[in-house]
Amino acid sequence: MPIITIREALNQAIREELARDENVFLMGEEVAAYEGAYKVTKGLLKEFGDKRVIDTPITELGFAGLGVGAAMAGLRPIIEFMTFNFSILATDQIINSAAKMLYMSGGQFKIPIVFRGPGGSAFQVSSQHSQALESWFAYFPGLKVVMPSTPADAKGLLKSSIRDDDPVIFIEQERMYGNKGEVPNDEDFTIPLGVADKKREGTDVTIVARSLMVPLALKAADTLAQQGVSCEVIDPRTIRPLDIETIVESVKKTNRVVVAEESHPFCGVGAEISSEIMERAFDYLDAPVKRVSGADAPMPYAKNLENLAIPGVDRIVAAVREVAYLE
Amino acid sequence: MASQVIMPKLSPTMEEGVVSRWLKKEGDKVSMGEPLAEIDTDKATMEMQALANGVLRKILINEGESAPLGQLIAIVGEPDEDISSLLNQVAAPAPKAQPPQAQAEKVEPTAAKVEAEKPAPQATAPQGNGSQAAEVTEKTASGRLIVSPLAARIAAEAGIDLRSLQGSGPGGRIIKKDIEAAISKPRSVPVAQGFPRAVETRSFQQVATVGASPYRDEPMSEIRRTIARRLVTSLGPIPHFFLTSEIEMDRAAEMRRGINALDPELKISFNDIVIKVAAAALIQHPEVNASFQEKVIRYYERADIGVAVAIEDGLITPVVRSADRKSLSEIAGEVRELAERARSRKLRPEEYTGASFSISNLGMFGIDEFTAVINPPEGAILAVGAVTPKPVVRENEIVIRQVMRVTMSCDHRVIDGATGAKFLQTFRKILENPLYLVV
């Protein structure tokens, strides 16, 4: 299997879906002529032309709304936000229109749209450009939220998202575009939404990690294995619908959980997962569920403080040792 | 800190335990997991492990004495530690005995009044000790018991008293590891060596009255107490009636000889045949394979046959499950194995509870006929006598036949005379023509 970056995997997914279905089109800031701020859309304008790959003005609310309208009319738009920080401007279209249209039209209008782009922290881009917004979108019924952590997941999940008839928020991690991994060449390769992936088998502690935290959790598991602690790493991949069964099944085996996330803790996805585990696997818990989250503060610009604000391997290791009663 | 040793729950029906032997003396060093004492529960003799390291400072219950669950029976602590406050708690006068409320609420108002005036019978046995113990555990548990949900669940399933454990988690939280340690230890120790008891020390009391026989009072073992308690709940409240039938066993004996000749290893006994035939008859008469419950009559799908086994100090009825579906050789093997373990007191609770019908056989003692007491809540029990040659009249001639007499005790609330008689008729028909077993 070819080894490619997440950036290339996403590019493959979009290219294959543009070729597969003429109703699919791509729209966003700098996606066409400049080939994407992060070069995810490289070569697509040349290959598919300016009716399928469309540059927009800096008007997030406007082109998000355009996308929702196109979806109502039967097209399958992919809307790129240069980063998800800018999706905040478009939330009225995403939440009030895309998420609710199927319900409010009594099932008359499906909204097969993908809002995608980088999210989470990057490198020293400070408070307004370092936000993990998944819990915002996952909060609303009507939206699906996807966060891949490997090139293969990125490709398979994006293809499924484009083919899905519901609006999907597809959050790519800004620091991870260059991460490499094996990706199937197959045009029919897809990964179903709503299915978690066991990234590592273990017996003592379950680490639930998504996006940026997955490689860190795997490193932590390596370190802990040397200390005699066997960790199971579960990557939900889809935040909504959440594959809680896989998580609970793992917890029933290990009896201890750490949820790692780069987002703020308050009302975060980790809080939701903790609550679900408590409700579904209370009698299997030998220790309280432990969250490792980003700092409950705006992201600092200073590099040393930024490092402290984002969970690292050492914090995950410490949390695992705590729930395993090794501290 | 001094650690309190309390009477642990060692069987699902245990309400109190007798210290049959202390394995440590006061002043002996003890370490966690080491056997501290042998406890007679209502069903078996179990070893009780120390749950803390230190020195056995004080024994509060002598050998042969009983204590209710949770009562403080000893103190383990540092050699020079002050344990006077703990001892004071034990010595303190017992607070007013709590009336057994649940009991009182169940009886009718007038009865309740009478009840209230005299001490409730249950409370009399452990009386003072019991209420003291309750107080001690209450006081020491003033800080909440901290336990992980998983640990609490495993402990409940294993019947482990969380109060007897020291948690190893933060703030003394009892975690999975602690329960697993508690579970693995008592089981790994053989209980057999608990038996040699100081028989020679038992002497007879001389009686003042001239000519009267000397006697000795022996503390009742837990199993004897359980038998006593259970049997008065049988013949007393259960309206028994009895049906006796005489059965020709010539063909059954022939079949037994034939089967055993096939394979000497099989060793099928008459009792095994009786179990098999009773199971077959029960399936044909489901109204007898039943028990009286508070509001319903419970009918069983399969014939789970309790087989009374005499053991030192009493009897126990291990259960042959689904006897109707088992072959004679399976039944014979199972009965042999269960009886063996019953005699060495190694039966698990689920192996001696929940039968749908019982059989008691005193044939080997040369008993021709007897009546047995129903093992509640079962609906009936079959008392089986010896197989003996007897002269009988057949076609106006006196001939010799192998004859066995059985008497079924029935709970009249479940089984009526005719119902029981029909069952016995079938039972007899099959036993006299065992070929029915294969048709």
Image (cartoon, coloured by chain):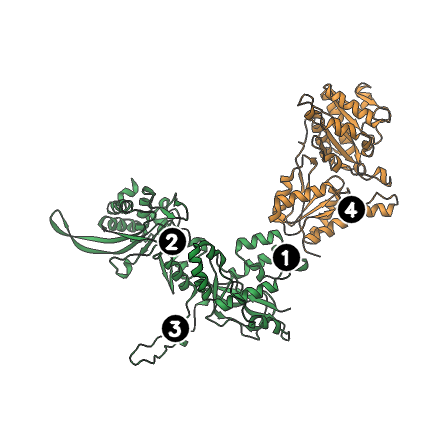
Chain colours: A orange, B green
* Neighbourhood count class around disc 3 (C-alpha, 10 Å): few under 14, some 14–19, many 20 upward: few
Residue marked by disc 3: B217
**In which chain is the residue bearing label 2?**
B
Determine whether A115 is above or below B309 in the image: above
* Neighbourhood count class around disc 1 (C-alpha, 10 Å): few under 14, some 14–19, many 20 upward: some
Identify the mark at residue A86; answer none if there is no mark.
Answer: none
Residue A119 showing in the rendered view: yes
Q: Amino acid at mark 4?
A: Pro
**Looking at the image, which residue sits at the far left?**
B396
Q: Earlier in the sequence, mark 1 or mark 3?
A: 1
Q: Amino acid at mark 2?
A: Pro
Same chain assignment for discs 4 and 2: no
Same chain assignment for discs 1 and 3: yes
* Neighbourhood count class around disc 4 (C-alpha, 10 Å): few under 14, some 14–19, many 20 upward: many
**Residue mark closest to the camera, 3 vs 4:** 3
- Residues at marks 2 and 1 touching, judged by CB atoms closer than 8 Å: no
Q: Earlier in the sequence, mark 2 or mark 3?
A: 3
Give the image location of residue A5, x and y in percent.
Answer: 77, 34
Determine whether B237 is above or below A4 in the image: below
Q: Amino acid at mark 3?
A: Asp
Residue marked by disc 4: A311
**In which chain is the residue bearing label 1?**
B
Residue marked by disc 2: B376
How far apart are labels 4 and 2 at the CA level?
63 Å
Give the image location of residue A182, x and y in percent.
Answer: 72, 35
